[in-house]
């Protein structure tokens, strides 16, 4: 009788170990699937954001079929520049001008740039905003060629 109980307990233990390993494998598999789905979703979101960013600049350029040159027409304006004030936050500036084209880091400040200061195809149009590195607020601003 004792022998039968030991055999039954051994079988039940073996079944529990077997079932727990199956459950653990399924949990691991589900976590991997969730991570893959997350990564695919993030990749798709990053791709979409990249496309939207590229599309936001597509109207800034035109092709002159007579000369074969690309002409740059920036989407930044003097009106936008004039809305920027000393003390504004970086987020407020970006909400007016959109994502910046370049960032130049300094010691206690940094510069964000919009437009093209060195356009070889036409007049330069650009904005530079100097921000405090600690507070991320506007210290000064500069523009060239905006109308």
Image: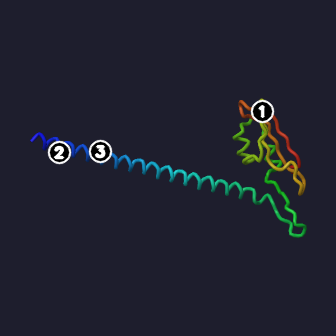
Q: Give the numbered dot on residue 109.
A: 1
Q: Nearer the viewer, residue 47 or 8?
A: 8
Name which residue lies at 73% across and 48% down: 98
Earlier sequence position, callout 3 versus callout 1: 3
Q: Give the numbered dot on residue 17.
A: 3
In the displayed structure, 9 sits above or below 71; it is above
Question: Does dot 1 land on a helix, a strand or a loop?
Answer: strand
Mark 2 = which residue?
8
C-beta proximity under 8 Å, tags 3 and 1:
no
Name which residue lies at 57% across and 51% down: 42
Q: Residue furthest bottom?
A: 66
Horizontal side, residue 76 vs residue 1: left or right: right
Horizontal side, residue 127 vs residue 44: left or right: right
Q: CA distance from mark 2 to mark 3?
A: 14 Å
* Circle nearer the viewer, 3 or 1: 3
* Circle nearer the viewer, 2 or 1: 2
The answer to which quarter of the image holds residue 112 is top right
Report the coloring of the rendering.
rainbow
Q: Nearer the viewer, residue 32 or 95?
A: 32
Name which residue lies at 89% across and 55% down: 120
Q: CA distance from mark 3 to mark 1?
A: 61 Å
Name which residue lies at 42% across and 47% down: 28
């Amino acid at each position: 009788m004792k022998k039968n109980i030991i055999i039954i307990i051994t079988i039940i233990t073996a079944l529990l170990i077997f079932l727990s390993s199956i459950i653990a494998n399924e949990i691991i598999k589900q976590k991997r699937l969730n991570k893959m789905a997350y990564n695919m979703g993030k990749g798709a979101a990053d791709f979409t954001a990249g496309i939207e960013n590229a599309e936001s600049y597509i109207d800034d350029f035109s092709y002159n079929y007579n000369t074969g040159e690309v002409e740059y027409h920036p989407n930044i304006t003097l009106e936008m520049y004039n809305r920027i004030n000393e003390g504004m936050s970086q987020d407020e500036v970006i909400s007016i001008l959109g994502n910046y084209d370049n960032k130049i880091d300094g010691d206690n400040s940094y510069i964000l740039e919009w437009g093209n200061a060195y356009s070889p195809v036409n007049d330069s149009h650009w904005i530079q905003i100097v921000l405090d590195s600690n507070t991320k607020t506007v210290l000064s601003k500069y523009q060239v060629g905006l109308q």
